[in-house]
Image: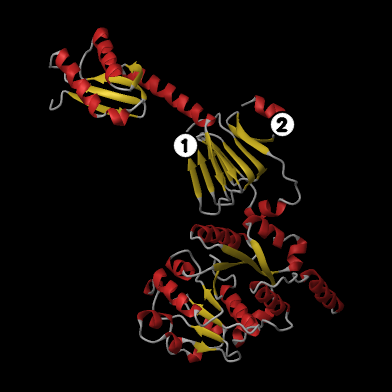
Amino acid sequence: MSQPVIIKSNRYGINLILDPNIPFQELLYHIAEKFMESEKFFKNARMAISFEGRELSQEEEYRIIEMISQRTSIHIACIIDNDEAREEYTRQRLDAYLAAESGNTGRFYKGTLRSGQVLECDTSVVIMGDVNPDAKIISAGNIVVLGALKGTAYAGVPENEGCFVVALDMNPAQIKIGNIIGRSEKSLFASIRERKKVAAEPQMAMVSNGHILIEPITKNTFNNI
Amino acid sequence: MSEVIVITSGKGGVGKTTTTANVGTGLAQLNKKVVLIDTDIGLRNLDVVMGLENRIVYNLVDVIEGNCRIKQALIKDRKYSNLALLPSAQTRDKSAVTPEQMKKLTDELREEFDYILLDCPAGIEQGFMNAIAGADRAIVVTTPEVSAIRDADRIIGLLEANEIKQTQLIVNRLRMDMVKRGDMMTVEDVCEMLAVNLIGVVPDDEQIVVSTNKGEPLVGSDALAGKAYANICKRITGEDVPFLDLNKKANVFSKLASLFK
């Protein structure tokens, strides 16, 4: 092993790859050195840690964590075992957490999205304007259109089916929530022409029994979220 | 203050060139000094619609490449001495000029003309980028068809992205009889979808085909389309002109038609 300690970071935190052959004291020294080098990068970060390459006793793990906490501003939230099943479980839980979080944070976009324009967002998004045919919104969370939705909306990307799409004038070409797709049967001509006959009311699209369900917004609507 | 106006649409065949010819001629009728530039390199048409195709010696690419001076390439209109055409090159393609060169050219023309109208090619590629490069404002032409409207929407988005501040809309070839039957979108439908200011509605008029073939723009004539174009020109100069009542005219025609049935 060329380096006694290697830090690898992933989406969930950091992974320490440790040399199995050197004495623990020396290893601890190398870990400290490594972390202090990258102190700025990890500043005040809150992350999970996992170990690889060396069997550690509980006490050894504890000493490493203590050292990191003392010498740097990194907060170690938890230790992840390098056990595949457990890692998968952690990954799922974290994904669920991140997905839930994306439904709770959002950003605003002011303006009309026109044909050919795509808005991608890793949080929920509120559009203050119309989404015209052939324009597309892709959001990890919910989508609220304070205008007419005539284009395509993907909410809960990649697979959060608990998300919703709201529009003041709901006339989408296609809505996808998680993996469930619903598309309009109406032609573009019909959807533009019909606008006048039916007074627009705010509607909400969500997943119900494996289908996209679009309903007018009532008090009960929000109880289901 | 001279203005550079690009006439564009995204989709082909909706009436950009006809509009450029008629708006240009109409502005000349209002005693403005006007130059029309055909930016559709390789597929020129504006010269034919203006009836000037036999007078071309030099063209846009010659000017850009320095083979001639601007003045040598400008063709004076047959009727209006304050109207000129800078024709496009037929033997080259869009890559023969760059947006920077177009901007420089339009800026030079500002010194002599009140209005510089650019007839934009269909599409969103280099020809489009060339045409809008020097423009202060844009007129988007669409017909009340879903395909044309969607392309217009895309174009408006691109104009916004390229910081063209003022964009106005012409709804061309409207057929009131079809609108009444519910077979065609209304002007309101189009405007609501595109959300830009309307500067004119031109009814579908077979006189346009006649005038195009003759090479004589019909703006200012008694034809309904001619009146519509004349009004558009006044609105371009900032005058507030009410929109034509296309309904009334259609009624007169249909009544006449029903007399002969």
Chain of residue at mark 1: A
Task: Find numbered disc 2 in the image and state the secondary structure of the residue it sits on.
Answer: loop
Within the image, what quadrant is residue A24 found in? top left
The reply, left or right, for residue B260 in relation to residue B14 is: right
Can residue B184 be seen here? The reply is: no
**Between marks 2 and 1 in the image, the one whose residue lies nearer the viewer:** 1
Above or below, A113 against A140 in this view is below
> How crowded is the residue under tag 1: few (<14 C-alpha within 10 Å), some, or many (20+)?
some
Can residue B60 be seen here? The reply is: yes
* Precedes in sequence: disc 2 or disc 1: 1
Task: Find numbered disc 1 in the image and state the secondary structure of the residue it sits on.
Answer: loop
Q: Amino acid at mark 1?
A: Asp
Distance from disc 2 to disc 1, alpha carbons, whole Å, reads 28 Å
Q: Amino acid at mark 2?
A: Thr
Within the image, what quadrant is residue B19 found in? bottom right
List the single residue furthest toward the right.
B259
Chain of residue at mark 2: A
Residue A122 marker: 1
Picture quarter with the N terminus of chain B: bottom right
> How crowded is the residue under tag 2: few (<14 C-alpha within 10 Å), some, or many (20+)?
few
List the single residue furthest toward the front.
B1
Residue B155 at x, y = what percent? 53, 61
Residue B69 at x, y = what percent? 40, 86
Which residue is at a point 23% across and 28% down the rendered structure image? A37
Above or below, B137 against B23 in this view is above
The reply, left or right, for residue B131 in relation to residue A184 is: left
What residue did someone put label 2 on? A218
Q: Nearer the viewer, residue B212 or A166?
A: A166
Which residue is at a point 54% across and 54% down the rendered structure image? A115
Above or below, B245 against B191 in this view is below
